[in-house]
C-alpha cells in the first residue's frame, strides 16, 4: 500500500522526479536543511523553527485531486493519502496526511465544509524522515472558536504553569498554492515530546479515551479498559503499572491514600494541571468527558504524570451536558467536574486529601495572581490578536466572521441558546468567581 501511494504521488505531483508539483528543497535525495531522511534519532527538535512565538508559519499541502477526494469521501474514516509538505520554506515531497478530530470532524462534515483538521505523518513513506527533528505534526482548524486563540492561549497557560503540554504556532495554510485558511500547528505527543519533558522516553504513554478514560476500576485485566490506548512500547506491552495505578486510585483506604497514591502518581503535576483546567473551565477533558489528556509512566520516578491535550474548547466553550453560562462561570473549584463525582476519581480522591487540596488552592491563587490574572490575560489576548488579525480577515474558509473575531476577543457572542464567552471578559468573571470561593 505504501508503494502504491508513492507511485500515486509521483504520477500526480511529479514529486519523485523533481517536477513542478513540489518546488523547493526535496527530501527524496540528499536531505535538505531542516530535513533528516536517515533512520534513527537526528537529535533534539528545533522547536524555535517549528513553533515560532512571534510570527505565522507558511505551510502548503500539495495534494492530488483524486487523493483529496479520497479524504473527503467519508470524513469519519481515518485514511492516509500522499502529499507534499512545504513548511516554513522547506519541502518534503513524500508525506502522509489524514483528517483528525472527533466531534469537530462530524460537525465540519455536516456544515459541508472542507476545513478539517489534519494530521501529517512525515515518515510514513520515507523511513526516518523528519522535519526540524520531528516526524508528526497536527494542523488544527479552530473549530468552535471565533477568536482562533483558545488553543494557543490554553496550551501556553498549561506549559507556563509547569504542565507537560504541546507547543503550538499559527500557520497560514495553502492547498496546492491557494489560500486555505489560518490554522494552528500543534506538537505531537510522542517520544520527542517525552524526551523534552522527562528524563527518558522508555515508559508507557497512554491516551485514555471514552468509555474508560474516567479511570474508574473495571477489573485487573487491561481488556476491561478499551479506552486506554497505548502509544509507546506497543510491540511488547506491559500494562501492570497502569493497572496498579488504577487499583490504588480506586481502592486505597482514605487513611493510606496520600502515601500509596503519591508513590505511583505525580500528584503535584496533576494538581497543577487541575488548577489550569479549573481556571479555564476546560471541560472537554478528564474533568468533563473523561478524555483529551495523556498519562505517562516515568520509569525514572516510578510515577505516572499527566499531560494536557486538545484545549480548543477551553475558556468555558464546552457546556458538558448543556450547563448554563452562569453555571460554567461559577463552577466550584472544590468539585470542578460535570457529572457523578464517583466517576472522576483522579480529581475527587485527590481533593479529599487535605494537604493536596491546600496545595491545589495555592496553585489556583498563583494562577490568579499571574498568567490567569485579568490584566495579564488581556495583554496576551491583545498581542496574539494583533499577530493574526490580518490573516483572520483574509481567511476564506473560517467558521465565523471577522466581526465575530473582534467581538469574541472581549465580549460574549450570544446567538439563541449558544453563548461563546469573550476571552477577556471570561477571565475577569472566572477570576472573580474563584477569588470568592478560595479560602
Image (cartoon, rainbow, N blue to C red):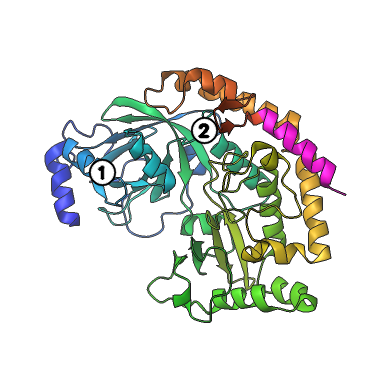
Q: Residue at x 71, y 50 (%)?
A: 275
Residue 283 falls left or right of residue 351: left
Q: Residues within 10 Å of mark 2 (few under 14, many from 20)?
A: many
Question: Which residues are drawn in magenta?
Answer: 424-439
Residue 234 vertical placement versus 414 (above, below): below
Expressed as whole percent of the image width and height from the top left, the position of residue 52 reads 52, 35
**What whole-number distance in Å separates the C-alpha atoms at marks 2 and 1?**
24 Å
From where the camera sits, is residue 386 visible?
no
Expressed as whole percent of the image width and height from the top left, the position of residue 309 reads 53, 50
Q: Is residue 276 magenta?
A: no
Q: Secondary structure at mark 2?
A: loop
Expressed as whole percent of the image width and height from the top left, the position of residue 94 reads 25, 45
Secondary structure mostly taken by the magenta-highlighted segment of the chain: helix
Instruction: Locate the N terminus and report the quarter of the image it occupies.
Output: bottom left
Residue 140 falls left or right of residue 48: left
Identify the residue position indicated by label 1 in the image. Answer: 71
Q: Residue at x 60, y 48 (%)?
A: 283
Residue 394 vertical placement versus 18 (above, below): above
Q: Residue at x 50, y 36 (%)?
A: 169
Viewer-side residue, 269 vs 141: 141
Q: Residue at x 71, y 57 (%)?
A: 271
Viewer-side residue, 392 vs 428: 428
Identify the residue position indicated by label 2 in the image. Answer: 145
Expressed as whole percent of the image width and height from the top left, the position of residue 282 reads 61, 46
Amino acid at each position: 500500500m505504501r508503494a502504491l501511494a508513492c507511485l500515486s504521488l509521483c504520477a500526480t505531483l511529479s514529486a519523485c522526479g523533481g517536477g513542478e508539483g513540489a518546488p523547493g528543497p526535496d527530501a527524496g535525495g540528499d536531505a535538505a536543511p531542516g530535513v533528516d531522511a536517515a533512520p534513527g534519532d537526528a537529535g533534539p527538535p528545533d522547536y524555535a523553527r517549528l513553533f515560532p512565538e512571534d510570527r505565522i508559519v507558511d505551510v502548503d499541502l500539495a495534494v492530488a485531486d483524486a487523493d483529496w477526494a479520497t479524504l473527503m469521501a467519508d470524513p469519519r474514516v481515518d485514511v492516509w493519502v500522499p502529499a507534499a509538505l512545504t513548511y516554513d520554506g522547506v519541502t518534503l515531497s513524500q508525506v502522509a496526511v489524514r483528517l483528525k478530530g472527533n466531534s469537530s470532524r462530524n460537525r465540519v462534515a455536516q456544515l459541508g465544509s472542507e476545513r478539517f483538521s489534519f494530521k501529517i505523518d512525515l515518515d510514513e513513506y520515507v523511513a526516518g524522515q523528519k522535519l526540524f527533528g520531528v516526524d508528526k505534526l497536527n494542523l488544527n482548524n479552530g473549530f468552535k472558536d471565533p477568536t482562533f486563540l483558545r488553543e494557543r492561549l490554553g496550551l501556553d497557560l498549561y506549559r507556563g504553569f509547569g504542565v507537560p503540554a504541546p507547543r503550538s504556532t499559527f500557520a497560514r495554510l495553502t492547498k496546492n498554492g491557494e489560500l486555505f485558511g489560518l490554522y494552528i500547528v500543534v506538537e505531537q505527543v510522542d517520544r520527542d515530546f517525552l524526551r523534552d519533558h522527562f528524563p527518558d522516553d522508555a515508559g508507557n504513554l497512554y491516551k485514555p479515551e471514552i468509555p474508560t478514560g474516567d479511570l474508574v476500576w473495571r477489573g485487573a485485566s487491561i481488556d476491561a479498559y478499551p479506552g486506554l490506548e497505548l502509544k509507546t512500547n506497543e510491540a511488547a506491552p506491559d500494562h501492570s503499572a497502569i493497572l496498579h495505578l488504577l487499583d490504588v486510585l480506586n481502592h486505597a483506604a482514605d487513611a493510606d491514600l496520600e502515601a500509596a497514591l503519591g508513590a505511583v502518581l505525580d500528584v503535584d503535576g496533576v494538581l497543577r494541571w487541575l488548577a489550569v483546567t479549573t481556571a479555564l473551565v476546560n471541560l472537554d477533558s478528564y474533568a468533563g468527558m473523561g478524555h483529551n489528556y495523556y498519562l505517562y509512566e516515568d520509569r525514572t520516578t516510578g510515577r505516572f504524570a499527566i499531560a494536557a491535550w486538545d484545549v480548543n474548547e477551553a475558556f468555558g466553550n464546552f457546556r458538558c451536558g448543556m450547563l448554563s453560562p452562569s453555571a460554567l462561570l461559577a463552577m466550584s473549584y472544590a468539585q470542578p467536574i460535570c457529572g457523578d463525582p464517583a466517576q472522576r476519581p483522579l480529581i475527587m480522591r485527590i481533593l479529599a486529601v487535605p494537604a493536596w487540596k491546600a496545595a491545589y488552592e495555592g496553585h489556583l491563587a498563583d494562577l490568579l495572581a499571574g498568567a490567569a490574572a485579568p490584566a495579564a490575560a488581556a495583554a496576551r489576548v491583545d498581542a496574539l490578536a494583533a499577530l493574526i488579525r490580518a490573516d483572520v480577515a483574509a481567511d476564506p474558509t473560517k467558521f465565523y466572521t471577522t466581526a465575530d473575531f473582534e467581538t469574541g476577543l472581549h465580549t460574549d457572542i450570544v446567538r439563541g441558546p449558544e453563548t461563546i464567552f469573550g476571552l477577556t471578559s471570561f477571565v475577569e468573571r472566572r477570576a472573580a468567581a474563584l477569588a470568592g470561593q478560595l479560602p
